[in-house]
Amino acid sequence: MPEVKAIMDTERIDRIIDKHGSEASSLIQVLLEIQKENHWLPKEALDRVGERLQVPMSRIQHIATFYKAFSLVPKGRHEVHVCMGTACHVRGANRILDTLKERTGIMPGETDLDLKFSLETVNCLGCCALGPVMVIDGKTHGKLTPADAAEVMKNYE
Amino acid sequence: MSEITLQIDGKEVRATEGMTVLEAARKAGISIPTLCHHEKLAPFGGCRLCVVEAEFRGQKRLVAACAYPVEKDLVVRTRSEKIDRIRRSLLELLLAHAPDSPELKELAGQYGADKDHFEKEAMFCIHCGLCVRYCSEIKKMNAVGFVDRGIRKEISFIPELALKECNGCKECFPLCPTSYLQAAFVLTEALASPAASTGTMSKK
Amino acid sequence: MARLNSPEELEKVRQDISSRRDPKKPCISICAGTGCIACGTSEVISAFKREIGKQGLKDQVDLRSTGCHGFCERGPIVVIDPEEICYLQVTPGDVSEIISQTLKEKKIIDRLLYVDQVTGAKTVKESDIPFYKNQKRIIFGPNRKIDPQNIEDYLAIGGYRALAKALFQMTPEQVIGEVKTSKLRGRGGAGFPTGVKWEAARKAKGEPKYVVVNCDEGDPGAYMDRSVMEGNPHSVIEGLIIGAYAIGAHEGFVYVRQEYPLAVNNLGIAIQQDEEHGLLGKNILGSGFDFDVKVHRGAGAFVCGEETALLMSLEGKAGEPKPRPPYPAVKGLWDKPTNINNVETWANVPLIINQGADAFASIGTEGSKGTKIFSLVGKISNTGLVEVPMGIPLRDVVYKIGGGIPGGKKFKAMQTGGPSGGCIPEQLLDLKVGFDELTQAGSMMGSGGMIVMDEDTCMVDVARYFIDFLTEESCGKCVPCREGLRQMHKILTRITRGKGKEGDIETLQVLAETAAEASLCALGKTAPNPFLSTLRYFRDEYEAHIKEKRCPALSCKELISYYIDPAKCRACMICLKKCPAKAIDGGKKKIHIIDQEKCTNCGNCFEVCPSRFGAVKKISGEPVPPPIPEPERTITRESKDT
């Protein structure tokens, strides 16, 4: 069972807040950094941020769900991002996505129960010459056919 | 505060600087339909029912009367074929969510909106935002807020706050045009109640 | 390099840098933009470093990793100066040959050159390659010469000369006047006259004032701003400082999409270097003008490209747009006068100050001055970023620069302006690129995305795709956008699935009007455009989907069937083996048949059938022919020869 960091210690959160300044306007920048370090935003982190930045929880909740960079649940070990930008769409990105949905068993925005894969669609990675494109753990795979995509997924176990 | 004269539906209206077109119209006894507007709250501009045609320096466009500031020599029309058509369309879109809302039914009658024009939607919140804004601006409690965006947008109570404060307040309840607010509150209470849980979902 | 306290010191340092650079010394420039990194340019750069070290050439050859060159289809790109030899699709395996043959022996490696698809002619010099030759790269061109992480490169090409001129030889009003005279229009999409906007912010009452760079480039398929920000961040910063001086702002923000980590990185380095050298901070170049800039990252919301939503985001709030008036120039960030401009708009400012408004205005048309960087992507041979003068015919962009449509396919439409724009059909290809021209044709300039579509693209699906995008990205505050798009999406999806009804088009048109007229912000107001323009030029496709349940482009999954033509099938068994649904029946000499009940329409068989056979067909709007009788399925020697 993979390890999930449920609590991020207060010290780390405070350090991030101090770096950006504990004003309400720093909320998004602070959350971005917590998300980057922790891969998700646990409730305890949000409580601490709300306390120090003097921001109501309703606003934090709105921001954490409005902006797609944030996740309120733990992410999988491998983050699979499929580009659905216009250029990739025109080159058949939908079929790549169908293949990935099939192979992982999850829909975009979800993480599988083993916390192995998180599947996301993104709108334009800016690699249009390589379309259709997917990025797994920061590595770009381009010029994909559905068969290629299935093949690439086999390498991530 | 200087005085500003503008024209609404052919009538000369005197307003003061800083007033909105809606405020000026109401002062002059001209009615413009609204849904998300509340005197005590900052203008929201969400329902768009109050759209009126504003002509300024030869340019005509539709603007939300609740938020548009009065300007000298502004020419406003509150009804036209296009405006009525758009208001009817807006009402039909909302009636798909909340066909039983008294406010919507009344307006639907005025504009000939057909509640069955669009297929029924499961979610009956129409996002007027009155509850969220009232709790934030007037009560300064922020016990209910918005979640997500676009077609997935919803309202949601903050359980810790709501369970502590709402039963003693409930001032926002009468504001809700669809009673989704009351339903959401009941659901929040139910989810938080130990008796209703299966053990793992209790105590947040 | 020490802190620069005057324009004279700046010029001295510039001369110093130039004197240390020998223009005849071989220099290898490698594109290290995000696109080429995805193609493996990092390994090519490492290979060069290793090989140069190994061959003891470190002092004889300069190696520079630069920003995006623009010819993204052919990356990784390596250009060797001073001869300007351009090598394309370079792999790490080519590196030692490049060093030994081209650098040492001055021999050209033919296979790495650009080849004309039609004539077969090879081009050696970068500027002779048709893709580059037909462009006018006044803003984007410098990317090729600069390492974005080294301020000296920017100074070497004349960087910050415009800033010194503005601060020491011009008043703020004169700067605004120059920008007004240039008739520069915003490059972010709306095309509002920049000088007029600056003037409004200058005249507005309230302190402090702010300037903002909008780098929230969200249009799918557009990545021009990213490449400018990654490859030449100083050009944007210089423009921003000049603008701040003109307006009277002392604090600026650069709002960058969080999906652009390299841009954020390079921008941060550029700002730091500027601060070290007195080009940012207090008393810039000894002028007495103070200006600081902070980088603020977006968090994944397309709507934050809308200026009022962006300001909300800067304030740490949800990106829900605000009604205008009041405009940001009057009441923006923290209700103070704020001027927001797009990355490319800011990048044009140093050029206007350096060369003068008239020189700038001599390029382009009456209504659209200067150049525009476009991302030319989709069904096009030469995918990449192109910079062209306003007024160039679209046809030239597609064919002379873009190299036409690959695979022998026919051009169908070009989508410009992203989700706010529309499609330009073939009959309008002679349209001259410009703000007003594109708007009149039912599209718009937008941020610069040019998505090329061919005969295989379903235009109804294009409309559905953009509405789908916007239902996710809408902030959800106002009814016409949130609810209007919700219903438009449902209807368009039904149509593409063969469930369209009479009256659907009319309903869509009413919803389009409601959104266009009554939405709170430009996202909602322009959302109907892709639908309206595809309906205008491709109405026949809508009618075919609704009335005949047929997709003329043979694209919509639920409306097509796959069929193996028995006359062409050679029973090679490739499709049979690749079918994930095991829906193909056949054998070594037995003509294959697709079982329509089992077929999931994945299209694999269509992809893998060898082109010399071309036996798999797509059918739409008509029934699949019944299977041929069993005895006829056997391929004999005679049947093979016919």
Image (spheres, helix red, strand yellow):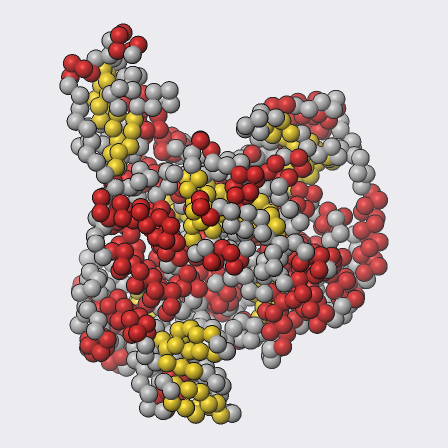
Residue C17 x, y percent position in the rendering: 80, 47
Check the image and name the residue furthest to the top: C637
Residue shown at 81%/62% (left/top)?
Answer: C6
Residue C638 x, y percent position in the rendering: 26, 7
Count of residue discs: 0
Q: Is residue B106 above or below residue C565?
A: below
Using the rendered view, name the quadrant where residue C590 is placed. Answer: top left
**Left or right, residue B67 beside residue C599:** right
- Residue B84 visible in the shown view: yes
**Left or right, residue A22 beside residue C634:** right
Q: Is residue B158 above or below residue B172?
A: above
Residue shown at 40%/45% (left/top)?
Answer: A84
Residue C602 x, y percent position in the rendering: 29, 34
The one of A131 and B144 positioned closer to us in this rendering:
A131
The one of C206 and A100 positioned closer to us in this rendering:
C206
The one of B142 and C150 positioned closer to us in this rendering:
C150
**Left or right, residue C600 beside residue A110:** left
Residue shown at 22%/26% (left/top)?
Answer: C594
Residue C13 x, y percent position in the rendering: 82, 52
Using the rendered view, name the quadrant where residue C549 is placed. Answer: top left
Image quadrant where one finds the C terminus of chain B:
bottom left
Q: Is residue B72 above or below residue B120?
A: below
Residue shown at 83%/49% (left/top)?
Answer: C15
Using the rendered view, name the quadrant where residue C197 is placed. Answer: bottom right
- Residue B193 visible in the shown view: no
